[in-house]
Amino acid sequence: MDQIASTQLLLSALILASIYALVALGLNLIYGTMRLLNVAHGDLMMLGGYFSYWVFQLVGIGPLWSMFGAVLLTAILGAACYLSIVRYVIGNRELAARLEANSLLIFFGFAIIIQNGLSMAFTSDPRSYGYLNSILAVGDARVELNRLAVLGLGTVASAGCVLFFQFSRFGLATRALIQQRDAASLVGINADRIQLLVFCVGFGMAGLAGSLVSMTETVTPFGGFPYTISAFVVIILGGLGNLGGGILGAVLLAIIEIYGVALTSAAYRSILLYGVFITVLLIRPQGLLGRSAR
Amino acid sequence: MKERALTIVSIIAALALFVGAPQIVNAYWLGVALQLLSGIALTQSWVAFSGLTGYVSLGHAVFYGAGAYVMALLWQSAALWEILVASGFTAAALALLIGYPALRVRGPYFVILTLGLSELCKYVVIAIEAALESSGRLLFDTPDPVFLYYIMLLLAVLATLLTWGLARSRWGAGLRAIREDETAASTVGVPVTFLKIMAFVLSAFIPGVVGAVWVLRTTFFEPMQLFSPTTSFTIVTMAVIGGSDGAPGPIFGAAFIVILSELLWARAPQFYLVLLGILLISFVLFIPRGIYGQLTALAQRRRA
């Protein structure tokens, strides 16, 4: 039982929570603002991961710097995606009538293109590199420095993002858009510009998460999918579109996952994940923090 | 009337061609025809639920894989048709089990669940197989390919009839109403939850049987392959490319994709999938009604 109470497990749970929070934020932002479910989110992460991997391999610069490049890369992709495709879909009456289904199919196509494109370009070999991998003692736990970096940067980025949307003018406008779409445009909020920025930030967060994760995990062309699923579970726990709730959801899922695996076995990891998901759907489909269904 | 007669004649001709195919073509092309038929059967089942309701299922491979697993477990311990029926019912039961919580709530929950479900089932099956200390199962004394071909033909015809009948029925009208405006449908008295769940269960049955037939054909069961997300993706792409509002679309979509995969899959599988992704996005954006929908729209415009 003392194994369960150890600092080691607590630290693992916190690190995982910081990753989940970051991954889920980007997904939640785009879903909350535009009701678009980006099933390619995890694959964008892998794009960020590959970017940091190659920058480290080719010029020897670590992800603490290359993460800015990864964010830029994915944010530009987000802008391109919004300007070329999403705006067209929203503007087309026939397509917009079934926005949710159509956007899903489009993002599904994206996911397949990214996965197989990466696999074509870099083969499907798993990639990893050693960076900041000296081991530190934290209390009675031992942990690699890069995992602490993930924890620190992930927490700062998630908290920064939530605070930004809580307090800035732009964040206020975005939340107005989330709550009352039509009324928001009536009071002069430029929905188009906000949506463009939300796409940049949402995609960029995925790139950042991928860049950070590449320090501690291997990167593969098809490795993004589990992150997409975890992120979905996180935002459902916290309530779809609720940014602060997503952070709570991330902590909860990470605790369930780390302690669940410690108590049983690593083989049950994904079974646990879906178990949580289905249980929440059955008991509280509006999420733990969500208001009851309208 | 003339058009209707033409349609019936061409359906009979196509059926006659498929029935006679084993006598005419060699083993290789019979394999291609089998691909086509299984593509039609799977896509019709997808359209019967997702096409009509607009609830996009991104994990139909799970039913295919579940059916295949039942066949791999029971082969040679029961009669062939008994296992085929058991495969179908297992898939349908699985659909009921997950459809009930996921379809009670609206919106994206269902999609997320289907997306993850085939991955979950894949890992559950792998865990079970590991516990049973088996790594892949070989199936011995499987039936003759020509016999399997005829079962697949039957399944493709059944699936087509299912979608055709459903699309014309009151039930189908209810499902389409859900797609256009679920709140409105429910307000005017359409039992939305019941219709959705039943259609989902029905749309799972045939993929289960198709999976069972397919594993007899390949004679080898391997979870990574049979629960592959590529299967789900291919089904969705076939439906979107062909047209997903009725029975004719999937036939066009399956034919298109099978020809494309004949040309590319063996030589450049990753490029083939990238191309499929591009095709999927392009069709959603520019030809949302699919090949068949576009053809009928063009024909109507010419007549007018």
Image: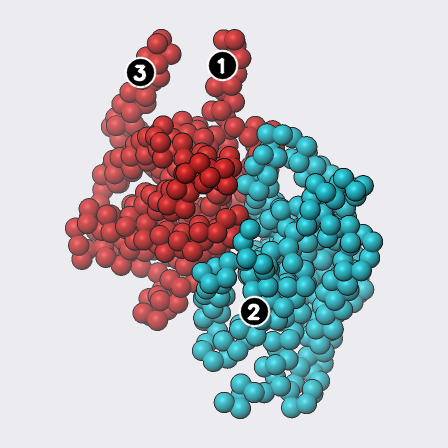
**Mark whose residue sits in front, 3 or 2:** 2
The secondary element bearing badge 1 is classed as helix
* CA distance for labels 1 and 3: 19 Å
Assess disc 2: are there few (<14), some (14-19) or many (≥20) residues with their C-alpha within 10 Å of its C-alpha.
Answer: many
Disc on res. A253: 2
Amino acid at dot 2: Leu
Q: Determine the colour of chain A.
A: cyan
Amino acid at dot 1: Ala
Task: Give the x, y percent position of residue B69.
Answer: 32, 56
> In the image shown, does B11 or A26 lie closer to the viewer?
A26
Q: In which quarter of the image is residue A271?
A: bottom left
Task: Give the x, y percent position of residue A289.
Answer: 59, 64
Q: In which quarter of the image is residue A113?
A: top right
Q: Are marks 1 and 2 on the same chain?
A: no
Q: Badge 1 is on which residue? A: B299
> In the image shown, does A68 or A215 lie closer to the viewer?
A68
Q: Determine the colour of chain B.
A: red
